[in-house]
Image: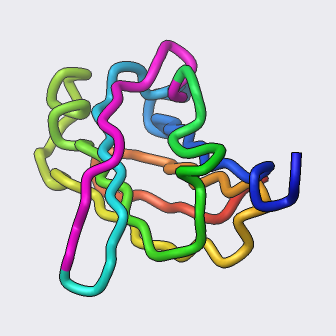
Amino acid sequence: MSDTDSGYLTTHVLDTARGCPAADLRIELYRLDGERRTRLVTLHTNADGRGDEPLLAGAEFRAGCYELIFHAGDYLAASGAPGGFLDLIPIRFTIDAPGEHYHVPLLLSPFGYSTYRGS
């Protein structure tokens, strides 16, 4: 396997208010090419707050600009969280080293969130 084929993209969502993985949270992944936005993947997180497979891998995993949309509002409402403050959480990022692992976790609570490039 060459370096350009070894990279992949994953995500993980943790519900920091409840202290557990965010299970059954809908996530969409888009590739952005100028004004064009192409949906590549739609998934729901598993019991561990992750997808069952990488979001992108192999030939689909290439350099460029991407956007993850986390449907936090639906998840938070279903979990009984107070408020209704957050709805869709978009995270745009760039893959510039397609031979590497990109991990984009989301730490979620009813009134805020954070993210970072994980490992």
Location of the N terminus (image quadrant): top right
Indicate left or right for 98 with 10 as reference: right
Residue at horizontal 18 percent and vertical 37 percent from the top: 82
**Vertical order, 108 against 13 (above or below):** below
- For the image, the number of numbered tags is 0
* Of the pair 42 and 4, the residue shown nearer to us: 4
Residue lying furthest top: 47
Between 35 and 75, the residue placed more toward the observer is 35
Colour scheme employed for the rendering of this structure: rainbow
Q: Which x, y percent locates residue 52?
A: 55, 20
x and y percent of residue 99 in the render?
A: 79, 61
Where is residue 46 drawn, in percent x and y? 47, 17
> Magenta segment: does it hold 117?
no
Q: Is residue 44 magenta?
A: yes
Residue at x 73% of width, y 72% of height = 97
Q: Residue at x 20, y 75 (%)?
A: 36
Extreme residue toward the left, this view: 84
Is residue 54 shown above or below 44? below
Q: Position of residue 93 (x, y in %)?
A: 49, 73
Question: Is residue 46 left or right of 25 when viewed as pictured?
Answer: right
Left or right: residue 14 compared with residue 83:
right
Quadrant housing residue 115: bottom right
Is 31 or 72 nearer to us in this picture?
31
Segment colored magenta: 36-51
* Image position of 73 (left or right of 20): left
Quarter where residue 37 is shown: bottom left
- Which residue is found at the position 61% from the left and 65% from the top? 116
